[in-house]
Structures are given as C-alpha cells and as structure tokens.
Image (cartoon, helix red, strand yellow):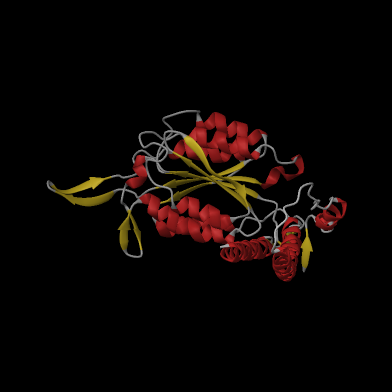
C-alpha cells in the first residue's frame, strides 16, 4: 500500500493561487508620452506581440503549477509499505568473543584439506553457526591486547558474519590476550536486560591462549555470574604433533600457552561449560551442541518493510522546471531577434 508521512503538506497546494489573488497588478500607466508619426504601426505590432505572449505564457503557467504539485507530493514523503512480516524472537542475547591475537595465526588447522591458520578455521566454522541462530540477538567482540565491540547486539546476522569475515590478526593488537577484558566488555553490554530475561544472556568465548593483559578472567566471571550471564568457553588449538624442520623431526605443542584451568573455572563460575577443540571438526561439533541450547520463549516481532518514494515526484518537478527554463530562454531569444 502507498501512504504519506506528512499528508498535511497538501494544504499548501493552493498557495500559488492565493498569492496571485492578493498580489496587486503592475501599473502600466505612464506620466509622459512620446508622440511618434508611426504610432498605428507600433500599436499593431504591440497587439500582435501581446497575443503571442498570451499563447506562450499560458502553457508555462500550467507547467509551473504542475511542478508545484509534484513538489508538494515529494514534500509529503510518499512511501510504499509491504505486508507485515513476523520475525521469530527467542529472547536470547548471545555475545561472541573471538581471540584475534598473534597466536591465532598458527597454521595448525585444516579446512577443506588445506592447511589454514586458526582464525580462518574459526571463521569457517562460525559462519553456519551464526546463520542458524534465527531469533537471537547477536553481538561480536574481538580481543587481543584490548577488547573491542565490533558489532553491538542485533538481529542482523549478515552484519555479524561480515564483521567477523573482515576481522584480521593485529587489528586489536597481537602481543597479548585480554580474556578478562573481553568478558568485562560482554558484561557491560548484557547487563541492561530486564531481570526476567536473566537466563537469556550467553557469552561464547573462544581463545587459544592465556590471559596476560587487563582484567583477571575469574574476577570478570564473578561479575558475569552476578547478572546471570552464562559463559561457554572454548579452548582452541592442536595437540602435540611431529613436524619436520632443518634439524629433522621435532615434537611441538602449538597449544602450550592455552590456559585450560582458567577457562574451566570461568565457565563453571557462571554455570556454563568448557569445550576443547583440537581441529575444525571438533569445533564444528561444539557449535552444533551450543546451537541446541533451548531458547527462551518470547513473542514474535512484527516488521513491515517500507520504501521511500519521494525522489520520483521530486525528479518530475525538477524536469518540469528545466522545461520552463528552456522555454524562457527560447522566448527571450525570439524577442531579442524581433527587436533587432
């Protein structure tokens, strides 16, 4: 259906006629006169010119009034409104906190049979998880030396996917891992929910290291518990493996910096769970498990798509104004040629 946001603008339609009606006509009387012997010839030419002006001015006035009508229509803000769409809402606010520190650049993961670094693996697994969270408000926190809110809580899952996809190692620093700051930032963003929705606050924390900057994670977890935030922590990184080097085969542990003890304590403090992901398959299974969390039932939201259409009548008004201008220029040239 079509409607107008400012229908009262149509009250201005008769404004040009009102101004014209109250305007005083221009006086053509002159106090002095010049007597010429060929007055009759000039009078005949003047009559012919006046008749010609009446024929040319009348269409211009019509065009001007049409331009005014379309300008008023544009000012009334016309819009098209579609059918109402119901959006299922679970009532759950889910914050993702993803580690993008320098250690996430370790290429100990495989995706589609290709060796990739940890951040690429996380992006590939998180994408379908985000797509399936219909009805949840989701937010994204990226952390390394500091924690930053990349995307506030929103129903727009495509924005979450895009912001995660565009993240890169180094955009939040690369030398440290501020796990506690990430939890604290999530607490700050989730604490304003109504008290009856306290069970709907969830933080999914993914990291491959240990906290070595900012707030203590255990202290931050206790703050999260006070306002009812559940934290599901995921420790990410491969186990010990044999690699070839210049000195031959060596046993290395890419996850030696992972502080599983602290992550388990953080999750247990808030009533959540801790998961260990050693590869993309385990990480995918973890997110499938998290995706089965029973949502908190809530009423559906109604959304009605709308599109503004003011630019169509405005374009027509500008086009008519251009025609009037061209007509005026053409008339001026004709008069100048006649006078010459």
Q: Nearer the viewer, residue 173 or 239?
A: 173
The image shows residue 224, relative to residue 92, as above or below, that is: above
Which residue sits at x=62%, y=55%?
293
Q: Nearer the viewer, residue 156 or 122?
A: 156
Q: Where, by quadrant of the figure, is residue 15 drawn?
A: bottom right
Which residue sits at x=30%, y=48%?
240
> In the displayed structure, does residue 160 sit left or right of residue 207?
right
Q: Where, by quadrant of the figure, is residue 3 drawn?
A: bottom right
- Residue 266: percent from the left, percent from the top? 54, 37
The image shows residue 52, relative to residue 141, as above or below, that is: below
- Residue 308: percent from the left, percent from the top? 68, 60
- Residue 179: percent from the left, percent from the top? 48, 36
The image shows residue 320, relative to residue 117, as above or below, that is: below
Which residue sits at x=68%, y=47%?
200
Which residue sits at x=70%, y=52%?
91
- Residue 102: percent from the left, percent from the top? 35, 40
Which residue is the extreme one toward the front? Answer: 37
């Amino acid at each position: 259906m079509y409607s107008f946001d400012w229908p009262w603008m149509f009250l201005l339609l008769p404004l040009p006629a009102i101004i014209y009606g109250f305007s005083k006509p221009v006086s053509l009387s002159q106090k002095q006169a010049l007597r010429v012997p060929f007055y009759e010839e000039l009078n005949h030419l003047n009559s012919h010119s006046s008749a010609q002006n009446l024929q040319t001015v009348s269409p211009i006035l019509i065009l001007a009034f049409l331009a005014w009508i379309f300008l008023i229509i544009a000012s009334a803000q016309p819009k098209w409104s579609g059918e109402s769409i119901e959006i299922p809402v679970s009532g759950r606010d889910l914050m993702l906190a993803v580690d993008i520190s320098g250690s996430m650049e370790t290429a100990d993961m495989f995706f589609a049979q290709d060796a990739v670094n940890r951040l690429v693996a996380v992006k590939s697994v998180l994408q379908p998880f985000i797509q399936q969270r219909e009805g949840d408000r989701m937010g994204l926190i990226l952390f390394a030396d500091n924690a930053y809110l990349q995307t506030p809580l929103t129903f727009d899952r495509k924005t979450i996917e895009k912001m995660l996809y565009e993240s890169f190692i180094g955009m939040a620093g690369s030398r440290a891992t501020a796990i506690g700051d990430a939890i604290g930032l999530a607490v700050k963003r989730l604490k304003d929910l109504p008290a009856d929705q306290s069970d709907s606050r969830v933080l999914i924390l993914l990291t491959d290291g240990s906290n070595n900057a900012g707030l203590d994670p255990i202290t931050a977890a206790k703050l999260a518990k006070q306002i009812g935030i559940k934290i599901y922590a995921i420790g990410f990184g491969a186990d010990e493996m044999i690699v070839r080097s210049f000195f031959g085969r060596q046993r290395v542990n890419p996850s030696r910096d992972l502080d599983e003890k602290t992550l388990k304590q953080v999750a247990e403090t808030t009533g959540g769970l801790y998961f260990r992901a050693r590869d993309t398959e385990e990480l995918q299974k973890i997110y499938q498990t998290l995706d089965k969390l029973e949502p908190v039932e809530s009423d559906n939201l109604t959304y009605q798509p709308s599109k503004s259409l003011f630019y169509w009548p405005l374009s027509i008004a500008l086009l008519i104004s251009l025609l009037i201008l061209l007509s005026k220029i053409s008339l001026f040239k004709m008069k100048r040629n006649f006078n010459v």
